[in-house]
Image: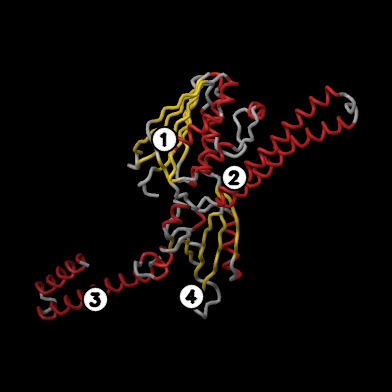
Amino acid sequence: MRLMTAAAAIVFAGLAILGFLAVGYALAGFAIVTAAAFLATRGGEAVGRRARPTSVSERADDPLQVVIANLPDPVIALDGDGRVLALNERARSLAPALRQGEPVSLALRMPELIEAIGRAYARGEEQRIEYSDHVPLDRWFETVVVPVSRRANLNKPDLILMIFHDLTPLRRVEEMRADFIANASHELRTPLAALSGFIETLQGSARDDAKARERFLAIMQEQARRMARLIDDLLSLSRIELNAHRRPDTPVDLVPIVRQVVDGLETLARDRGVTVHVAAEGALTVLGDRDELVRVFENLIENALKYGAAGKRVDITVTQAVSTEGETEALIGVRDYGPGIAPEHLPRLTERFYRVDVSESRAQGGTGLGLALVKHILNRHRGRLSIESVLGEGATFTVHLPAPGTPP
C-alpha cells in the first residue's frame, strides 16, 4: 500500500506541475486513489482471514479443546476429512507424530483405525476396534470412534472423536493367569502321575515284594508332601493377595523372629554342613504380621541353606538405615557364599514358578512359589526385596521394611 500511495503522489504532483490538472483536482484525485487502495488492502486481509481454515484447538476458549484437555484417556478430535482439530497431552504422548491440521493417518499408521474412521463418518455410527502396537513395547488398545454432528441439520457428522483405552494391564493379567494355571497344573500333574504309577506297580508286579514296597512308599510319601507344599503355597499366595490392601498395624520385633527361624532350620543347616551367623543388636520393631514375616525369613534362609550350601556359611544381618528417600528402614540381609546367580535371572526370581535350575529346585523340594510369596508379603507390608549376586561369590537377599514413623 505504501508503494501505491507514493506512486499516486508522484503522478498527481507531476500532472499539477505540468498544468494538466489544477492543484485542487490533483489533491482530490490523490485522496480518492489512496482511500481505494486502503479499502482494497483491508478487504483482502479480511478475505484472507475468512479463507484460512481455523483449527478448533487454536482458540484457547473453545469448549471442545477445554473438554478434551481434561479427559483422563487419550482423545483426538478430527474434522470430516480426517484432519486433527484438537488433541490432549495423553494422545500426544501416545502418538508424538500427531500434528494439528494434518491428517491423522500420518501419525497413526494402522489400517484398521483409518477404516474405522471412514466407517464412522460414512454410517454415522460408533465404531470400536482393538489393535496392538509392538514398538517400542508390546501394548494393546481399544479405540472408540464416535461421529458427532454439532448442528441438527447436517447430513454427515462434522466431527469425529477418537477415544483410546489402554488394555495392556488387562492383557498382561490374562497372560499371567494363563501361565499360572498352566504352571500350577503342571506342577501338580508330576507328583500325581508318580503316585498313580507307584500305586499301579504295588497293586501289580510288586504286590509281594516287601523291599520294593518300602522304597515305593517312601517315594510316594515325598511326592504327597510335595503336593501338600504346593497347595499350601498356592493358598497362602491367594490369601496374601486378598489382603494386599490391608497394611498390618501390629508392632513386631524382627530380631526374635529371625532367631526363631534360624533355630527351626538348625537341623537342615547341620545336615548341609552350613554355619549360620546372625548379627543383630538390640530390638528392631516394625509394623507387621508376625506369621507372614516368619514365612518371609523361612523362605530366604532355607533357600540360602539349600542352594548356597557349597559355601558352608550363611550370614544374616539385622540393621536399620535411612533410604535414599529419607525414610527409616529395617534391613534384614541373608547372604550365602554358594555358586551365585547369573545376572539374567535376577529380575525374574520373584515370578511365580520361575526357577534358575528346575531339576535342582525340585530335587530340593521347592515349589517355585517361595520368592513370589516373599514379594507379595513385603508388598503388603509396604516393603521390598533387593537381590545382589556375583557368580562364584554367592548371593545376598535383603528385605527392606519401613520402620515406625515412616510415612505409609
Give the secondary structure at mark 2: helix
Q: Which circle's residue, 4 or 1, is located before the other in the chain?
A: 4
Q: Amino acid at mark 1?
A: Leu
Q: Secondary structure at mark 1?
A: strand
* Amino acid, disc 2: Leu
Q: Which mark is residue 36?
A: 3
Q: Amino acid at mark 4?
A: Arg
Instruction: Say which quadrant the N terminus sits in.
Output: bottom left
Question: Which residue is more in the foreground, 343 or 112?
Answer: 343
Residue 179 left/right relative to 297:
right
Point out residue 272 in the picture as x, y percentages from the top left corner.
Answer: 59, 21
Which element carries disc 4, helix, strand or loop? loop
C-alpha separation, residue under disc 4 versus residue under disc 2: 53 Å
Coloring scheme of the render?
A: secondary structure
Q: Nearer the viewer, mark 4 or mark 2?
A: 2
> What x and y, as percent, mark residue 353?
62, 37
- Please rate how many residues cluster around mark 2, counting C-alpha atoms within 10 Å: few if below 14, some from 14 to 19, many from 20: some
